[in-house]
Image: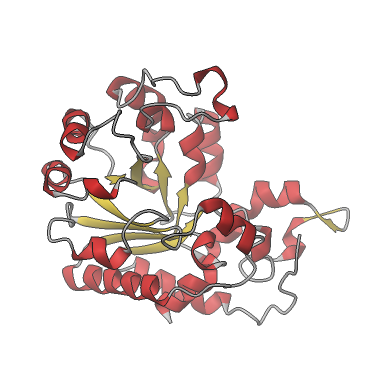
Amino acid sequence: MGPLFDDPNAFDRAALAERLRALARQNIFIGGSSWKYEGWLGQIYSRERYLARGKFSKRVFEQECLAEYAETFPTVCGDFAFYQFPAPEFWSKLFARVPEGFRFAFKVPEQITCKVFPVHARYGALAGHSNETFLDAHVFEEMFVRPLMPHRGKTALLIFEFGTFSRSSFAGAGEFVESLDPFLAGLPPEFRYAVEIRNPEFLDRPYFSCLRAHNVAHVYNAWSKMPELRYQMGIPDSATADFQVCRALLRRGRVYEKAVEAFAPYTHIQDPNPEARDSMKILIGRARENKQFLFLFVNNRLEGNAPETILSLVE
């Protein structure tokens, strides 16, 4: 499992929690991308809460750690939802583990956002084939929105993450917008929505205008092949909604697998990224100045340890 934090005073969890609560009172919600990281034991998590027969239990930890996560952070991005349509029973158990005032963001399942299924073993017979439910509003509403509706008070945001499209899928931003616009127009009004793209060439007026027309946020995303956060934030048309969303995931130029290999089990920062931190601090400042909601999510793969990165933003 790698080295863990043995000294409970090595990380000031209480101070971080207080600063994040103060920001949440200003509608600035900052948290991680997922929460089940054993590397955060002794930092965000207390080992003694996850014992079975006197020994640390991975099963108990994964089932129970969300409640302790929520003692520090006011929000989290549920990346898990990208891979499935969770059942109503799952949602009920999940939301019961967090207090009032906690806010989830969820990635919408890829059955809605994937145009062609990647050639990968986990897709089985679907690999390489077109997705019949791509931007299918009925499937989205019935399979994802309807089960979430009883929990909308704790659901801050739904994120449509679109992977990199080949030119055979969409020749450019215009073609993408032609498909996206009618879908966004019909979204149920009970939730906030955001779009995250992985095609840098789409960062142009047609895309931003489409999002703005429906009060859907562009996700400022730090990703291996996307422009730096500061560049995206500097595009005049990029503020498309009355709230902001940022996901700080990877250093530009570093692929996901290499980040996992370099940083797991995510016990501490290993590659500081001052530029990304400065950009996130600017977003926090903008949200304060404009009195807007901000949802900011930091991934372990950005610097090596999301809690330490987040602490650096609010110190």
Residue ID at (50%, 19%) = 126
Question: In the rendered image of this protein, does residue 81 appear above or below residue 179?
Answer: below
* Colour style of the rendered protein structure: secondary structure
Count how many numbered circles sit on residues in the image.
Answer: 0
Residue ID at (56%, 58%) = 259
Question: In the rendered image of this protein, does residue 298 appear above or below residue 286?
Answer: above
Q: Is residue 108 left or right of residue 71?
A: left
Task: Name the quadrant of the C terminus.
Answer: bottom left
Nearer to the camera, 303 or 93 = 303
Q: Is residue 283 left or right of residue 31?
A: left
Q: Is residue 127 left or right of residue 21?
A: right
Residue ID at (71%, 73%) = 5
Task: Residue at the far right: name it.
Answer: 53
Nearer to the camera, 44 or 267 = 267
Q: Residue 17, can we see it?
A: no
> Dividing the picture into quarters, in which one does residue 101 lie?
bottom left
Q: Residue 249, can we see it?
A: yes
Q: Percent from the top left, x then y, of residue 251?
A: 44, 63
Question: In the rendered image of this protein, does residue 43 appear above or below residue 147?
Answer: below
Q: Percent from the top left, x then y, of residue 28?
A: 32, 65
Task: Name the quadrant of the N terminus.
Answer: bottom right
Nearer to the camera, 75 or 36 = 36
Nearer to the camera, 60 or 209 = 209
Q: Percent from the top left, x then y, of residue 119?
A: 51, 28
Residue ID at (34%, 55%) = 226
Q: Percent from the top left, x then y, of residue 131?
A: 39, 21
> Dividing the picture into quarters, in which one does residue 285 lie?
bottom left
